[in-house]
Every structure is written in C-alpha cells, then in structure tokens.
Amino acid sequence: MTTLLINNAHLIDPANNVDRQADIYISRGKIETIAEANTLASTGKEIDHHIDASGLIACPGLVDCCARLREPGDENKATIATETRAASHAGITTLCCPPDTDPAIDEPAVVKLIHQQARHAGYSHVVTLGALTAGLKGKHLSEMAALSEAGCVGLSNARHPIENTLILKRTFAYAATFNLRVFIEPNEYSLSVGGCAHEGNVASRLGLQGIPRSAETVAIASAIPLIKETGVSVHFGRLSTAEAVTMIGRAKHDQLPITADVSAHQLYLTDDNLGHFNSACHVQPPLRTQYDQDALKQGVQNGIIDAICSDHQPHEQDAKQAPFASTEPGISALESFLPLALNLTRDGIDIHTIIRAITATPAHILGLNYGQLAPGAVADICLFDANERWQFDTEKMLSCGRNTPFNGWHFQGKVKYTLVKGKLVGN
C-alpha cells in the first residue's frame, strides 16, 4: 500500500493550530496533501486504500515519553514486539524507553539491539534514553557522546540515585557540552528508600512505610542550581506533588531550560485507591492526595506540566500477588493512555491542550520530528471516536502485562485506526 486517503476527518493538529474537517492524502509514508473535506476523492489521485473518517478525530500519532518495554532483560514480563503492538492498537506511534533495562542502556550495542527489535516488530517507533552514569550506578559518567551517536535522544539515570552531587553536576555539564537533554525522575533516595505509599493518613492506617513529598521536592531543589550553573536542558518526569508543580513553575518563570511531565494515572488515582492493599495501585512515585492531584491537573491546564505520559510498566501476574510492600510497582498503561487523557475534558481542560500534551510537546522534548500533521510530515496518525463509550477489560489487553487498576472502568474515546509511516498497524 503506497497511497491512502482519509476522508472527512475532524483534523486536530495543535502543532499547526489546525482544527477543521479535512481530507488527508498519504503517499509513500508521508502526508502529501491536506484539503477541504470530501474533495480529494474526485481529483483523480491514485488511491490504494480509503478510510471513511466521518465522525472520527484525526490527530498526530501519540508520543509516549516514558514506556518500559522490558526488553532486554525482563522478557518474562513483556517484549518490544508485544508492547509496541499494544501501543499501536492504542494510537501510540512513538515510545521512549528509559535506560533501566538489563543490561542498562549504557553502551551503543544495547541501543542498536532495541532499535533493531523495534524495526523488526514494525508497529511503533521506539527511541531510547542513554544511561547518565555507567551501569546506572551513579559513580562514573557514561559514554554520552557514543550513546548520542548510536541514536539516544537524551540521558537519564531513571530512578537510580546519584548520591554525589558533584557527579550529578559533572553529568549535567558533560551533557550540556553535547547539547543532550537530561531526563530526571526526581527522587531523593534517602527519603524514599523502603517506602511504598504516600506518607499520610492512608499509609498510617494500612501500616505501610511512607514516601514523603519531600523525596520529590528535595531532588528538584538540588537539581535547579546545577541547571543554572551548567545550562543543561532538563526534563523532570513523573511529577506527583503540588509542591513540585510550584517549583517547576517558578523555574520556568526564571527561564530555566526545564520541561516536565506527569503520568496519566496520577491524574485519576489518589492514595485513597489503595483501599485494602490494592497492589494494582502500587506505583513509584506513589499516588498522592486529592490536593496533589488537583495541582497536577492545573499544571497540565496552564502548561507548567508540558506532557502526559503512560509510564507503562508491564508485569507478570505473580509480581502483584505478594503483600503490598513486596509487590513490584507499576501499571500496564498503554491501552488506558488515550482515554485517561481524554477524560481531562471533564475537568475543563480543552482537547487541544490534551492532544498537544500527548503528541507535539513530547515529540519536541524528545527532539523528534513527529507529533504534527502537515504536508511533508511522516504519516503517523491516530484516528479515534471521541464519543464512543466502552468498558476497559484486562482480558482484551494486548500488552503482556495485565497489571492495571482500571479493569472495569468506563471510558469515552476509542481508537479506530493507527497509521505508522502511512501503514495501518495494530487495528
């Protein structure tokens, strides 16, 4: 299939300020023409495949800036092939893999392996973050230049601590030299070690060791002066506290080169959802309070939080069947990503802001030429019915991980078609 016509779609492309009914003509993997709705079919263009998109929204393919695909190292949980298939079914055309694989992404061979496996699967684009320190051990700088040349779009130590602030400063300075963005999951290890829930009333009632808000805010406060000194661009991922939103807002006001994201589940779940030790809600950073959640939503609305990610972490069944504190944290989140994001319209956040936060902005943060629909752009497209109501069912998930607290939830907004480079995938 070399040509495809999408007819009469409601095109929403925040990157180009487009919101209208349109026809989209795709040739050889790229968007060739965007025209008024119901006009291109009669122009005599060669059309190998036709999609009637009446009643559907066409937006750029979703860009997920944090998804753990488990390969290499944890293929018992999932593989790149299974998770990119699930992603494409959910409208996600690009995923960014953090460096905490096994082995860690600290040498070019691992980068090449991941990219090769993604290309072989053929479902979604996969990009990688290289390790900020060798083996993610926080002791020695990684070979940043070599990782960048191998295709890494940035650097991170994931949730592995760098306890020596001098080493952290050196990683920032070195990354700035190569114009590489550093991705931080803010966590002061000494304050969070051993914890499994938000430090508050719920954790006290359940007898769980808590993680205070300060575990996140101290890490951010430590990084900001180093950002000022080195000039490095930093992305703070998976914010969970109201105080963190305030701190990021102040740093942006001071024009520091900072961006931030939030996991979709943090916008809908709080520590109250832990109920009676619901291990499906064991995540890191932990679910906080309604106060924090409200601040996170406000951060999305006013642009302090730039992007929303899935924070996808698939697990095998046994990983969630121990006592709460002994279970592995994380949610299998690809297939709930878009409906959770769309649900924000109920909180007064307009759909353009939402789509921008899951397409154009994360693409920009990752330095990618995706997240937009314009003539000449790669034809990565998500077509969804914003009005269709459906019930989430773990038995129908394509991800190898069924670990989700959203089983049985009623959602509105269903993906109908996903295109990657103009090719229909996953549907």
Image (spheres, rainbow, N blue to C red):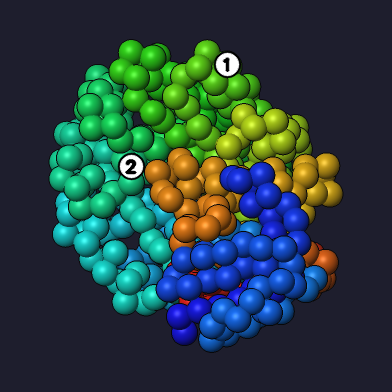
Q: Which mark is residue 253?
A: 1
- Tag on residue 154? 2
- Apparent side of residue 29 relative to residue 156 in the rendered image (left or right): right
Amino acid residing under circle 2: Gly
Q: In the image, residue 104 lies at what x, y percent? A: 25, 53
* SS type, badge 1: helix
Going 67% across and 37% down the picture, which residue do you hit? 300
Q: Report crowding for label 2: few under 14, some 14 to 19, many 20 or more residues within 10 A (C-alpha).
A: many
Query: In the rendered structure, which disc, 2 or 1, sits on the residue that comes first in sequence?
Result: 2
Placement of 55 over or under 48, stated as above or below: above
Q: Residue at position x 67%, y 68% from top?
A: 23
- Can the viewer see residue 194? no
* Residue 162 point in image, percent of width and height: 30, 31
Amino acid type of disc 1? Answer: His
Q: Quadrant of residue 182?
A: top left
Residue 418 screen position, x and y as percent:
57, 72
Q: Secondary structure at mark 2?
A: strand
Residue drawn at (16%, 59%) of the image: 109
Disc 2 vs disc 1: Cβ atoms closer than 8 Å?
no
The residues bearing labels 2 and 1 have C-alpha atoms spaced at a distance of: 24 Å
User: Which sits in the foreground, 196 or 246?
Assistant: 246
Does residue 156 appear to the left or right of 105 in the view shown?
right
In this rendered view, identify the residue nearer to me: 45 or 160. 45
Which is nearer the eye, 241 or 235?
235
The residue located at (17%, 54%) in the rendering is 108
Position of the C terminus, as image quadrant, is bottom right
Left or right of residue 80, residue 302 in this image:
right
